[in-house]
Image (tube, helix red, strand yellow):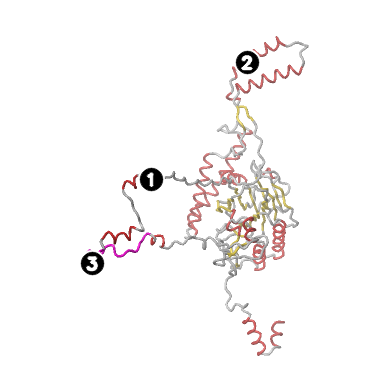
Amino acid sequence: MHAVTFVSRISSKSVLLYLGVLLLTHDIELHPGPYTPKYPCGVRAKAVRWSKTRTAVACDSCNVWYHTDCMGMSTATYNSLNNSNVTWFCAKCDQPNTSSSLLDSYTSESQNSFAVLSDLPDGQTESSTCSDTSSFISIGTIEDLDSPPRTSSPQRARRSKKNNCKSFKVLTVNFQSIRNKKEAFWEAVESCNPDIIVGSETWLRPDILSSEILPPGYNLPAIRKDRNDGYGGVLIATKSDIIVSEVSIDTNKEIVAAEIKIAGGHKLIVICLYRPPDNNVASAEEICSAISGVVRNNPSSAIWISGDLNLPDINWQTETVTGHQYNLGVNSAFLATFQDVCLSQIVDFPTRGQSILDVFLTNRPSLIRKCIPLPGISDHDMVLTVADIRAKIQRPIKRKVYLWKKANMDTIRETMASFADSYLDQTSLDTPVESQWTEIKSKILSVLEEDVPSKMTSCRFSQPWITTELKRLSRKKKRSFRRSRAAAAEFDNTEHRNYKELKKTMQKECRKTYQTYISDLICGEGPSGGKRF
């Protein structure tokens, strides 16, 4: 109403004058289209902005900007370029010239070496004509070719050092009740062996312990935030050898963060969040404010954000809102926040139906090696992200375990019987107690080392209830999952139905096998395979 009243008070000539001035400023787009950054990155086409947390350099030849983390440029190299007048060229402009000059260099211009003898001038022979060409390429005799006068040992090509950096795996899971799907979840963890588990919709209450839901080998308690109503909820679980601490976030929304120490004295911040499927703009802005606070408080750290955002309207490739399922303010708030803190979306495949609901965002995309989908335990697919980093770990303490089933009991009995006779003959009531105990202890330890085999405990925690048949069924489910995703583009529902049936069968078999294992362990004589722990 105010805009209409204001325009009605201005004459038509003034309106035309104002419109003409706006057009002359060249800031008005007559036909605005999809958002395209003014200075796109030459590697990932993301917008290059003036930011202290994410630096960039421009090529002096083509004037294209590049993010330093997208190229893998170190901070020392960037600082040396920033503090000097050295010219820098990108990889495209710095490539060698592959024209035909290399082949043309072997072509020598001559005075028609194939001229007819009768056409030669007086006093000139064929040998003098051919001498012009031989001045460029001089070939000796056959003996010279067979035995060169000077030789040198050939330089062997240096082998490039292999990257021995252990891959760091992150598994993003939408549980929809982890308690009811604990066995299927443990089987998925056994197959992919992730270092970090980021879970949403755990549907846990605060009175449920982390040891009831997590497999062995992970830090207890997990970093969690649960609802009192038993729905929603998020968690971050890390392996027991990883040094991790919780990052405090002052909000009641479903978002938690963990700090992990990585090699080189740097830090990795892992954030797990869950946004309920609603149109609450205030709730979305509060989550975005919490994300911005964590990122700005850790400017030199690598940031990983993963979880279920429920934002199917966003086209992550163009960073625009293309759908209308949720409020525009909700989508715009998250897009603006991710652009302000320079976060890039890694998940480029649908995780539920044809929508990308589960995300993995980072400010160091060059550290991510791959991101692939895995069969989920709910209506969401799991996301496995592999990164090229190495975390600081606590070396597990290995214990020596004696294998009494393989011990030579007859030899032990004979040895200890002879020791008892000699011990009674050599000792008396005046012998000190300490010397008697030392002698007995040393003899027992020597017998253990000689007659009882032993081994060191492994730091790899396996699930003894997962049988060979269960592993075979898991591989079959994964193959069906890949066929289902491939047939999704062809609108073939047959493969999808087969995958759903195998998924249900897998969950039933996991639950049945686990319950059978526990029943045999408690009530019977142990599992049939003999592997109890």
Vertical placement of residue 146 versus 332, above or below = above
Residue 248 placement, left or right of 184: right
Q: Position of residue 440 (x, y in %)?
A: 70, 18
Which quadrant of the figure has residue 98?
Answer: bottom left
In percent of width and height, residue 205 lies at 71, 50
Quadrant occupied by the N terminus: bottom right
In primary-sequence order, the first of circles 3 and 1 is 3
Disc 2 residue crowd, few under 14, some 14–19, many 20+, Cα 10 Å: some
Q: Secondary structure at mark 3?
A: helix
Using the image as rendered, state which of residue 470 and residue 78 is in the foreground: 78
Residue 456 locus on image (x, y percent): 61, 32
Specify whether residue 456 is in view.
Answer: yes
For the residues labelled 3 and 1, the Cα–Cα distance comes to 41 Å
Kindly identify which residue carries mark 3: 119
Amino acid type of the residue tagged 2 in the rendering: Thr
Q: Which residues are magenta?
A: 106-123
Disc 3 crowd rating (10 Å Cα; few below 14, some 14-19, many 20+) is few
Q: What type is the residue that disc 1 sits on?
A: Pro
What residue occupies the far front of the structure in this picture? 123
Q: Is 116 one of the magenta-colored residues?
A: yes
Per the image, the residue denoted by label 1 is 149
Circle 2 — which element? helix
